[in-house]
Amino acid sequence: MTRLIFLGPPGAGKGTQAKALAHDCDIPHISTGDILRQALKEQTPLGIKAQSYMDRGELVPDQLVQEMVEERLCKPDTKSGWILDGFPRTVKQAAFLGELLQKLEQQGERVVNLDVPDDVVVDRLLQRGRADDTEEVIRRRLEVYRSETAPLIDYYGDRHQLITINGNQSLEEVTAELKKAIAS
């Protein structure tokens, strides 16, 4: 049973690796961004609530994101496993997720941390060439990541659930290391 949570800074390759691995394992790749877009598209009650925050340019509150993740993890396709990408982002969300997985009897998750040095991340994101990806913006996003999400590394490390993968390798090398780590 593959249940994985992907951590790593923006540009670490989480989405790319999670999609490929989910495809190989025939389990859903659950990205909070995708959940949000789907809920907005389907105009679900949670999607409509989220839309009101986004229309005001505000972040969707934790509680709402948590409800969306819960709704997604209750769908039948998650019974054989899943990969969560973009959630949890804080220790508070991790505690919520732990309780939720216990309630759903889906424990046994492992956490993959794609470790990539900041300078490499900055270079990667600048090469993507998105208009909003200036070096200043990227470094600010990394600061936010380090302050809010990095404590999750200690949180899951203390619970012996953490697998750290060197994300500063070729795509193929990261994939191979990832497959080897989750097989053990």
Image (cartoon, grey):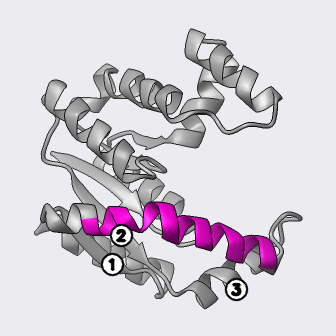
Most foreground residue, 25 or 14: 14
Q: Which residue is mark 2?
A: 113
- Range covered by the magenta-colored residues: 136-154
Q: Badges 1 and 2: C-beta atoms under 8 Å apart? A: yes
Q: Badges 3 and 1: C-beta atoms under 8 Å apart? A: no
Q: Is residue 142 above or below residue 88?
A: below
Q: Secondary structure at mark 3?
A: helix
Q: Residue at horizontal 44%, vertical 80%?
A: 167
Give the amino acid at mark 1.
Answer: Ile
Side of 87 where 125 appears, left or right? right
Residue 37 visible here: yes
What percent of the width, then of the height, locates residue 144? 59, 65
- Name the dominant secondary structure of the magenta segment: helix
Q: Residue furthest top?
A: 45
Q: Which residue is mark 3?
A: 123
Q: State how far apart marks 3 and 1 are (Cα).
A: 19 Å
Most foreground residue, 18 or 162: 162
Checking the image for residue 165, the label placed there is 1
**Crowd around label 2: few <14 · some 14–19 · many ≥20 (10 Å):** many
What percent of the width, then of the height, locates residue 7? 41, 62
Looking at marks 1 and 2 on the same chain, the residue that comes earlier in the sequence is marked by 2
Looking at marks 3 and 1 on the same chain, the residue that comes earlier in the sequence is marked by 3
Q: Secondary structure at mark 1?
A: strand
Quarter placement of the N terminus: top left
Q: Residue at horizontal 38%, vertical 58%?
A: 6
**Crowd around label 3: few <14 · some 14–19 · many ≥20 (10 Å):** few
Q: State how far apart marks 2 and 3 are (Cα).
A: 20 Å
**Crowd around label 1: few <14 · some 14–19 · many ≥20 (10 Å):** some
Give the amino acid at mark 2.
Answer: Asn
Q: Does 140 appear in magenta? A: yes
